[in-house]
Amino acid sequence: PQRGLILCSSRIGKNPASNFSFTVGVSRISATLAYIHPLYPFSVLKYNPNDLDYTFPVLELAESNVGLAIGDKATILLGEEGYSRQVLSTVFSRSLVSSSACGMCYPQQFFNVEAFSLLPEPRMGLSSIATVCSNGQISGILVNVPECAHNEGDELRVGLDIALVIPTLDHLRTSDYTPKPARVLDVQFTLEDAYTAHALGVSKQHIADLMAMSTKNQFYKVARELSIHTTGAHSLVVGDIVLQVNGHYVQGIVDLASFDTDEVELRIVRNGKELTIAVPTAPLCEANIRNVVCWAGMILQEPFHSVNHNAVSLASNAYNFIHDNGAPSVAESYHDNMFVVEIGGHAISTLDDVVQVARLLKDPKQAEFNAEVAANKEFKSGTIPGRDVKIRAVLINGDEIVKSIRTNDHYYPAWQLMRGPRIDDNWSFKEI
């Protein structure tokens, strides 16, 4: 509360170019989405603590890195629609979870996340978050994972150990800036038990060594490569079992989740043989948007995580993820999820390129026309300021499209939203 931070589910919104409000007591508090975690399904809202005249009850965070074990008793604390309740539950299982996309919508996806499940498990709102307490301390959180909008099944709800959350909260409490993007191995892992691992070539000595230091007795096998366009060739291949990272045994998926170096040394088993290899790490796509451009009703940003995972190629960094309803850009045909590579004969590779082209294509009669409209002067159809423009773009599946549109500088002027790198920075709007 002293820093003005609220932990919430990533379901609260995939686009941080938004403002939020929440109610505490009788106070309505404004907030911004300050940070979206790139690896785990939680986000952090930021508000001005001076706006809040309320004293929160305090619970201590558990310091253990072990996490909740199967069979542990837990109390789930929920607060929804102005009231709170408690649910007594038990840790039912622990597993690696992942989310998915359908090819038509691309929510942020999550891989290599170890989570726990509870039984009984309470019903929760889509963007709600519940606190999981054990022995009088906060041991974890229960969140809904953002999934495909076309998913007709049950919501994917996971429990995250508080040890996964604490580093982010500690950083945001003590720094003016959000954490730097991590680096990853860019592969998805699956769990194998000791028997299967031994059948795949892991020695009995390795199994004994791991059992002596960990109760999990699990091994991590590469299931698939995540990005098909990662810089440089993958050094890990499907079927590899990772035993050690930089000389230390892998005791949990967190040991393989992220790194702060360009390269790591891995001891692996491949096709029944042990190897030591140097593996380059890949930069994780930034999950936090700080630049949004709208032109002709197309709203563009840099590609986000699931786009990197699903796109055949990253044709540009000007990614169109949504349109304004009725905008010129949807007059001929409707396409979201595309990389804009050319506007009016001008090559596009960044959002700055879009801004420059928007200035070049702006109708010089726009200001005069706006003044006439403000003075209630009549105007004839077809005289609204705009230009005939061709747009070339590449879809997620690699198909190239060309669209011809007529811009409308009066009803759909170009604009830009920008936000600085500090946690407390607010969005600034300007018309291009």
Image (cartoon, helix red, strand yellow):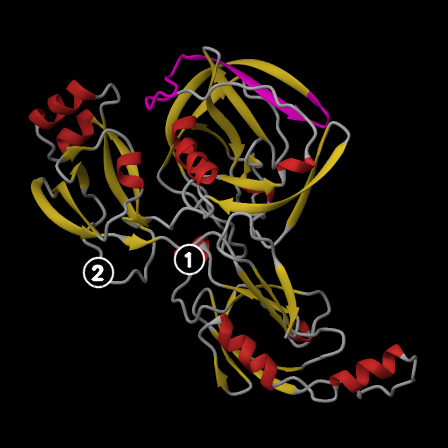
Secondary structure beneath dot 1 equals helix
Crowdedness near tag 1: few (<14), some (14–19) or many (≥20) residues, C-alpha within 10 Å: some
Q: Nearer the viewer, mark 1 or mark 2?
A: 2
Q: Position of residue 197 (x, y in %)?
A: 17, 31
Q: Can residue 382 be seen in this view?
A: yes
Secondary structure beneath dot 2 equals loop
**Magenta run includes residue 107:** no
Q: Position of residue 389 (x, y in %)?
A: 61, 85
Q: Name the quadrant containing residue 402.
A: bottom right
| Residue that label 1 marks | 310
Name the residue located 65 percent from the left edge and 68 percent from the top edge.
430
Tell me: 273 left or right of 11: left
Q: What stretch is highlighted in magenta?
A: 63-83
Identify whether 371 is placed above or below 23: below
Identify whether 207 is placed above or below 381: above
Between residue 361 and residue 34, name the one nearer to us: 34
Tell me: 213 left or right of 164: left
